[in-house]
């Protein structure tokens, strides 16, 4: 690898080429290559290879963020020297969450809040609004990496926040702030110091829809933990999802509510997501889970005769292509025709569901709306749908059932291979046709 010189770097995925290319051979993005001067890699302290049992085992010494569910999602709290990337769309609430965590941790010691995006007084104003005014929080509106490193080297902190990685730049690299080489260098140098000093560090990464600014994707391998901050900007709910964690399991989530006093944890997300459910045709309850904490969600479908020649398929919180596939399966395997209908599917509350376990609930909600017949209100539904209409098993079935029991549901329509849990009537189905016959 050459140590320095001009390279062309794809701003979408980080692929490096010695020549400019119109299309990235790695991610397929067009016009994404930018000229960058590659960074000098600093020689690190010499480390010798040693047998596995001769290394000291450090105690994680978990530090609480003071948000109970966030601690659980992180595997018990923050770890000394843990580098956490928190990525999310503009305005979702990243700075608010981190300022709140800073406020709570400031009782234990000094916090360095590096802000490349907002001025000191903007942060102070937010702080006053959400009740974070502790003088232990040192706000540092600096964008030059070398200056930040000096402060980090000189002083010790309980927590470091970098808001955001795209706005900070190193003077030794010629490309503009936010480019892949800058983002990598900034994250690498700051995390190196924090790791050595055992300071947990949050790094904010902006996601843009166009992917023009270096996305946080390239940083994912550099950090210990990656959190995605999701939610509808115009609804008050927010979800922090753990997508990578070297100190705990992934798929864990913590749900918050955004208000003028900042973010507030929702201790019972299931109750929150199904509280406004109207028991009517087109509504199905689905126990969602990707980690250890299941949440009951309402899947809503609306099927009505098409207004225009091309019927519409619209979804919110669910992949529209997956909906087309489910509609095709319903038609072929269960004689349920929607080709001359508009079909709308919504996951109530604004939650985004990617796991295929929701397929069966979507299919049954669509069928229920089409037939204008209500699904049993005391029933939860989960299972993946195969192309030949078979209902396939999903992971964590038992956890999902337990959550349904906790909220008083009496029946569960599930894949054939699921285990019985007692306290709830389990109705195993092997195909979409069978599920429709039983429920509608
Ligand atoms: N006075 C207020 N009352 C209620 N909510 C507010 C108020 N002011 C801001 N918010 C909420 O805070 C959000 C912005 O929070 P924040 O600045 O922490 O987001 P961010 O992810 O850091 O944004 P950016 O990408 O611009 O840095 C707004 O979208 C809004 O939901
Ligand atoms: Mg911000």
Image (tube, rainbow, N blue to C red):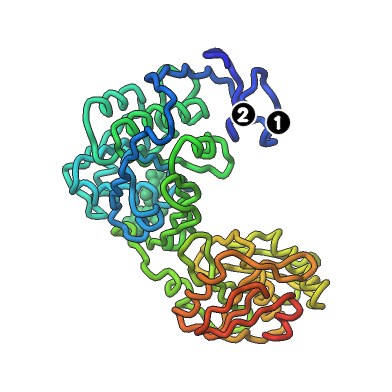
**Residue 80: percent from the left, percent from the top?**
31, 41
Q: Nearer the viewer, residue 39 or 130?
A: 39
SS at circle 2 = loop
Quarter assignment of residue 30: top right
Specify the quadrant that holds the C terminus: bottom right
Query: What label sits on residue 15 in the rendered view?
Result: 2
In the image as oriented, which residue stretches furthest toward the left? 135
Between marks 1 and 2, how big is the CA–CA gap?
8 Å
Residue drawn at (21%, 29%) of the image: 155
- Sequence-wise first label, 1 or 2: 2
Query: What label sits on residue 25 in the rendered view?
Result: 1
Position above or below: 388 against 434: above
Does residue 180 appear to the left or right of 259 in the view shown? Answer: right
| Label 2: few (<14), some (14–19) or many (≥20) C-alpha neighbours in 10 Å | some
Quarter assignment of residue 429: bottom right
Q: Nearer the viewer, residue 203 or 167?
A: 203
Q: Is residue 295 visible?
A: yes
Position above or below: 89 against 331: above
Specify the quadrant that holds the N terminus: top right
Quarter of the rendered image showing ligand 2 = top left
Position above or below: 232 against 218: below
Residue drawn at (70%, 27%) of the image: 22
| Label 1: few (<14), some (14–19) or many (≥20) C-alpha neighbours in 10 Å | few
Position above or below: 258 against 303: above
**Residue 398: percent from the left, percent from the top?**
53, 71
**Residue 370: percent from the left, percent from the top?**
71, 80
Residue drawn at (69%, 24%) of the image: 21
**Residue 291: percent from the left, percent from the top?**
49, 60
Q: Are marks 1 and 2 in contact (CB under 8 Å)?
A: yes
């Amino acid at each position: 690898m050459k140590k320095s010189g001009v390279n062309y770097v794809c701003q979408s995925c980080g692929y490096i080429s010695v020549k400019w290319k119109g299309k990235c051979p790695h991610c397929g993005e067009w016009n994404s290559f930018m000229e960058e001067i590659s960074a000098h890699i600093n020689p690190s302290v010499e480390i010798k290879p040693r047998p596995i049992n001769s290394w000291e085992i450090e105690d994680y010494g978990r530090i609480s963020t003071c948000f109970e569910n966030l601690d659980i999602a992180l595997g018990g709290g923050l770890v000394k020297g843990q580098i956490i990337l928190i990525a999310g769309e503009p305005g979702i609430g990243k700075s608010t969450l981190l300022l709140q965590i800073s406020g709570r941790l400031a009782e234990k010691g000094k916090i360095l809040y590096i802000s490349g995006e907002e001025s000191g007084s903007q942060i102070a104003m937010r702080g006053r609004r959400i009740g974070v005014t502790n003088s232990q929080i040192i706000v540092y509106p600096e964008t030059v990496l070398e200056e930040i490193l000096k402060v980090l080297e000189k002083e010790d902190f309980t927590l470091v926040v970098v808001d955001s990685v795209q706005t900070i730049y190193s003077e030794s690299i010629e490309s503009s702030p936010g480019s892949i080489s800058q983002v990598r260098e900034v994250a690498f140098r700051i995390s190196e110091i924090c790791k050595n000093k055992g300071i947990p560090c949050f790094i904010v990464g902006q996601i843009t829809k166009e992917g023009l600014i270096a996305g946080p994707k390239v940083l994912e391998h550099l950090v210990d933990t990656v959190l995605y901050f999701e939610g509808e900007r115009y609804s008050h709910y927010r979800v922090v999802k753990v997508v990578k964690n070297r100190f705990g399991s992934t798929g864990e989530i913590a749900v918050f509510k955004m208000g003028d006093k900042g973010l507030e944890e929702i201790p019972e997300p299931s109750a929150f997501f199904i509280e406004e459910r109207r028991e009517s045709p087109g509504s199905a309850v689905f126990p969602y889970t990707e980690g250890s904490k299941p949440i009951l969600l309402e899947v809503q479908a609306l099927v009505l005769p098409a207004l225009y020649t091309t019927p519409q398929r619209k979804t919110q919180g669910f992949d529209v292509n997956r909906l087309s596939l489910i509609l095709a399966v319903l038609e072929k395997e269960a004689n349920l025709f929607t080709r001359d209908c508009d079909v709308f599917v919504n996951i109530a509350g604004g939650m985004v569901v990617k796991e295929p376990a929701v397929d069966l609930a979507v299919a049954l909600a669509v069928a229920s709306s089409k037939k204008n017949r209500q699904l049993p209100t005391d029933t939860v539904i989960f299972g993946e749908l195969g192309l030949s209409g078979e209902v396939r098993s999903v992971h964590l079935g038992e956890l999902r059932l337990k959550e349904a029991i906790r909220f008083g549901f009496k029946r569960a329509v599930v894949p054939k291979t699921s285990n019985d849990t007692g306290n709830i009537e389990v109705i195993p189905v092997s195909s979409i046709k069978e599920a429709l016959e039983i429920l509608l």
